[in-house]
Image (spheres, rainbow, N blue to C red):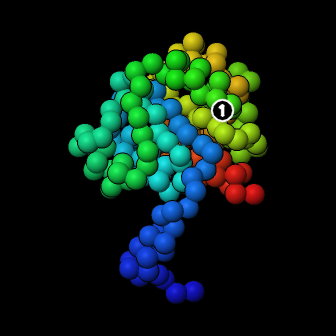
Amino acid sequence: MIKLTHEEIVARQVSGLNKPCLPFCVILNNIRSLHNVGAIFRTADGVGLEKIWLCGITGYPPQAGIVKTALGAQDYVPWEYREDPVVLAEELKKQGYQIVLLEQMAGAVSHDVFVPKAPVCLIIGNEVSGVSERLAALCDTAIEIEMAGIKNSLNVAIAFGVAAYHLRACFKK
């Protein structure tokens, strides 16, 4: 194997800019950290997400913390701010989206065995409190990432990355 040069990596990415997006969007609800939002933008670009919905107190571009970690992805991934995630989830559900919550809760299934039904809207909640009961009640299913160590969860941007790449793999089959 030969390591690709930076120019070769960029050329490979540019050639794929017109590829269709996955039937997959995400709602970020009350994400406090702008750096987490920026990291999610960058991962969303990598997986080919169709749209990011920013809700509640979640920051949005061009705030500096987002721009710093997104590294320009905020300019390529479609996004929109909506105050109320419940109203948005209801709208997406009416459009046929499977509403999936990434949350540790009773009845949640492991992310790695979850089989999505396109299109999917993944909901990511606040780093500490998750999502409201009203929003959780709208979900068709919940998925979680099993933890083996003493910590009970991953950073929200990392958790999104794990779930997003699993969904990408399912859609590419």
Q: In the rendered view, tell whether residue 140 sits above or below residue 36.
A: above
Q: Is 87 left, or right, of 108 in this rendering?
A: left
Q: In the rendered view, tell whether residue 104 sits above or below residue 79.
A: above
Quadrant where the image shows the N terminus:
bottom right
Q: Quadrant of residue 127?
A: top left
Q: Position of residue 71 (x, y in %)?
A: 32, 55
Residue ID for mark 1: 97
Q: Inspect this view and state whether residue 133 appears.
A: yes
Q: In the rendered view, tell whether residue 59 sits above or below residue 11.
A: above
Local packing at callout 1 (Cα closer than 10 Å; few below 14, some 14-19, many 20+) is many
Q: Nearer the viewer, residue 122 or 156?
A: 122
Q: Secondary structure at mark 1?
A: loop
**Extreme left residue here?**
64
Q: Is 36 left, or right, of 148 in this rendering?
A: left
Q: Is 141 left, or right, of 53 in this rendering?
A: right
Q: Nearer the viewer, residue 115 or 50?
A: 50
Taking the spot 48% from the left edge, 64% from the top edge, the residue there is 17
Q: Position of residue 24 (x, y in %)?
A: 60, 43
Q: Nearer the viewer, residue 80 or 147?
A: 80
Q: Quadrant of residue 78?
A: top left
Q: Nearer the viewer, residue 159 or 12?
A: 12
